[in-house]
Amino acid sequence: VHYIMNCAANVDFNERIDGAMTTNCRGPMRMLAIANRCTNLLAYVHVSTAYVNCNRPNKSLIPEELPQCAADGEQVLAEITQLSPPQLEARSAELLQKEGYPNTYTFTKAMGEKLLCKHHGRIPVGIV
């Protein structure tokens, strides 16, 4: 295997945060684990969405950099596994408001990209 392309995502804008994080945060990390086992890998390509930048001011330029998201993806992933459904809803609303994201899709896609960049190690990763 020379290339891996991950375009899988949960695109339901109103998915409960635990479900969205399973696909949009854990999914890229699972693909990265597969990539680490590929000895001839030249690139892991992750498909983003322009919506990861929806928390930027209107008409602002969008630089080619990671989305603006201060939340720690690993901490949020660990935290949500401990919450009941009503607690998940409340925590989700808090995170979305704090980070400026309108829905769980945009927030979890941004967090997935940050996790991927944090953990890619020797794997060449491109986000398109």
Image: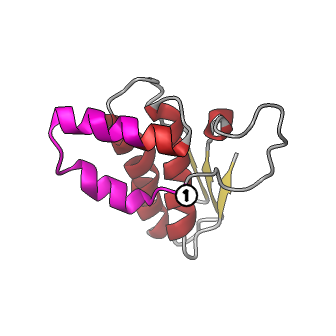
What amino acid type should be assigned to the residue bearing mark 1? Lys
Q: Residues within 10 Å of mark 1 (few under 14, many from 20)?
A: many
* Horizontal side, residue 66 vs residue 81: left or right: right
Q: Residue at x 56, y 52 (%)?
A: 69
Q: Position of residue 122 (x, y in %)?
A: 58, 76
Residue 93 appears in the figure = yes
- Say whether residue 8 is magenta: no
* Vertical position of residue 56 compared to residue 40: above or below: above
Identify the residue position indicated by label 1 in the image: 114
Residue positioned 77% across, 31% down in the render = 58
Query: In this rendering, does residue 38 appear at all?
Result: no
Residue nearest the observer in this picture, 100 or 123: 100
Residue at image coords 49%, 44%: 98
Give 89 or 26, whichever is nearer the viewer. Answer: 89
Q: Quadrant of the N terminus?
A: bottom right
Q: Which residues are magenta?
A: 70-94
- Percent across and percent down for residue 114 are 55, 57
The image quadrant that residue 65 belongs to is bottom right
Horizontal placement of 32 versus 78: left or right?
Answer: right
Q: Secondary structure at mark 1?
A: helix
Percent of width and height locating residue 9 = 47, 35
- Residue drawn at x 62%, y 41% is 48
